[in-house]
Image (cartoon, coloured by chain):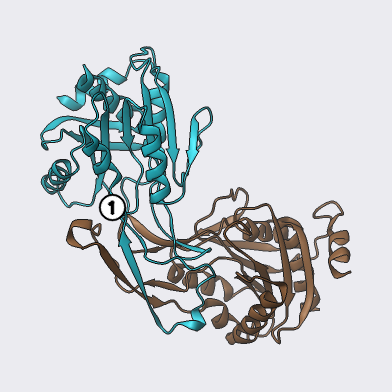
Chain colours: A cyan, B brown
Amino acid sequence: AIVAAALAAVAEPVATVRDLAGLEVVVSAGGTREPLDPVRFLGNRSSGKQGVALARAAADRGAHVTLVAAHLEVETEGLTVVRVETASELALAVESAAEVADVVVMAAAVADYRPATVSEAKIKKDDNGDALTLHLVKNPDILQGLAALGREGLTVVGFAAETAPSRDELLELGRRKARRKGADLLVVNSVGWAAGFGTDDNAVILLDSSGTIVGEAEGSKRQVADVVLDHVIALRS
Amino acid sequence: AIVAAALAAVAEPVATVRDLAGLEVVVSAGGTREPLDPVRFLGNRSSGKQGVALARAAADRGAHVTLVAAHLEVETEGLTVVRVETASELALAVESAAEVADVVVMAAAVADYRPATVSEAKIKKDDNGDALTLHLVKNPDILQGLAALGREGLTVVGFAAETAPSRDELLELGRRKARRKGADLLVVNSVGWAAGFGTDDNAVILLDSSGTIVGEAEGSKRQVADVVLDHVIALRS
């Protein structure tokens, strides 16, 4: 019923309401890349489609939007874009933009780990044996940091892409993450070898910071974006 | 002088000669991705532009071309494409296509190493500490394997993207690789944090299997492609 209501609400022509007018919205999108050397990197399969759909939806609904873009496989014409590569660069860009923001949506897939050292020259196979050990260190948790600011008037939205064999297990992973991160809204979706990346559609569950389900959405990434923004407005009113 | 002659030769309107007619050409292009889990992968910054330019040039010059494409950031309309993801998949596809090929051009950036184990579920940060150790194993050397076939009538072209502070050091790395790989032609270019990836131009040195310079080319990736194909024809005649 929640899904049906949400889809009905966005089946209307897009962007007839400018209900985000006057708001400063920061959206991060895409996948960070953590270099090992000038050639190789640790990446992830995020296409940036959901994040860019969120940025477009917010702009269409009247917000002033800054898109902090890691690696994208989608166009960003018409959007104000800050380009970043690594999780550290994304953290700096988002934290800087967040200082004057009303809403921050962390839709980017940020690397949890980066190589402990970055080689200035290409790592040569000849210099190594049949095996290579890569030492990784944890990146700062940007979403948790933003939520921990607890700044009055700032609404923080996070995303959690999880692999889970069932809806119950997906929800359990999402609930734990919601409580740990402390974001006002956590958008949980299921990903897998063949699901969730580069597609035009998405299906998500929305949790509050206590892990309670506050909504669901299924449809195009634009439709999902509009439902997420509906919930942001509800949270702020 | 070699560069000047080469550029003059390709300054003519493209594809006026069908000097590769009747030849079966296999070109690999793009960067392989080696998954750690359903979300993360080890990748490289190859855009596939040089490889796709080679495939197009060969097709324009009359060859029957199969493009074995790892991750690309460029369009492939009009080309016959076999899509692959990992180095192992690329090896299978190239080796299969090579069985009936006259020319194989290995322009893809193939991962030297892959994770020793691939996790079926997303690796969770909570299950690990502040550090993570990644164990990598060596991938088979596709170029060396093709050259080692020594099949009569098969011309094998390899690429070597090297980081080197000077032309001399680039050449030294290229020479060592030429001798080790045994390809009929090795196309050596310099890459770095800001050079060689995603750009429209390229500058290369061509070495034979003994490491001797047989040519150079500088210009658009299409121009470089045509010079490489000129050398392939010279090698086969």
Work out whether residue A52 or residue A7 is closer to the camera in this orientation and state it: A52
Dividing the picture into quarters, in which one does residue B103 lie?
Answer: bottom right
Q: Secondary structure at mark 1?
A: loop
- Name the residue: 26% across, 34% down: A157
Q: Is residue A110 left or right of residue A76?
A: left
Work out whether residue B166 or residue A133 is closer to the camera in this orientation and state it: B166
Q: Quadrant of the C terminus of chain A?
A: top left
Q: Quadrant of the N terminus of chain A?
A: top left
Residue B2 in view (yes/no): yes
Q: Is residue B84 left or right of residue B171?
A: left
Residue position for label 1: A192
Residue A224 position, x and y percent, is 30, 30
Dividing the picture into quarters, in which one does residue B122 lie?
Answer: bottom left
Work out whether residue A216 or residue A152 is closer to the camera in this orientation and state it: A152
Residue found farthest to the top: A17
- Name the residue: 13% across, 42% down: A179
Residue B60 in view (yes/no): no
- Name the residue: 75% across, 83% down: B212
Dividing the picture into quarters, in which one does residue A217 lie?
Answer: top left
Residue A110 position, x and y percent, is 34, 49
Residue B13 position, x and y percent, is 85, 51
Q: Is A197 placed above or below A113 here?
A: above
- Name the residue: 53% across, 54% down: B72
Q: Is A99 placed above or below B51 here?
A: above
Q: Is residue A1 left or right of residue A75?
A: left
Q: Is B32 placed above or below A177 here?
A: below
In this figure, what is the number of numbered marks?
1
Chain of the residue that carries numbered disc 1 in the rendered image: A
| Mark 1 closeness class: few <14, some 14–19, many ≥20 residues within 10 Å | some
- Three-letter amino acid code of the residue under disc 1: Gly
Residue A212 position, x and y percent, is 10, 34
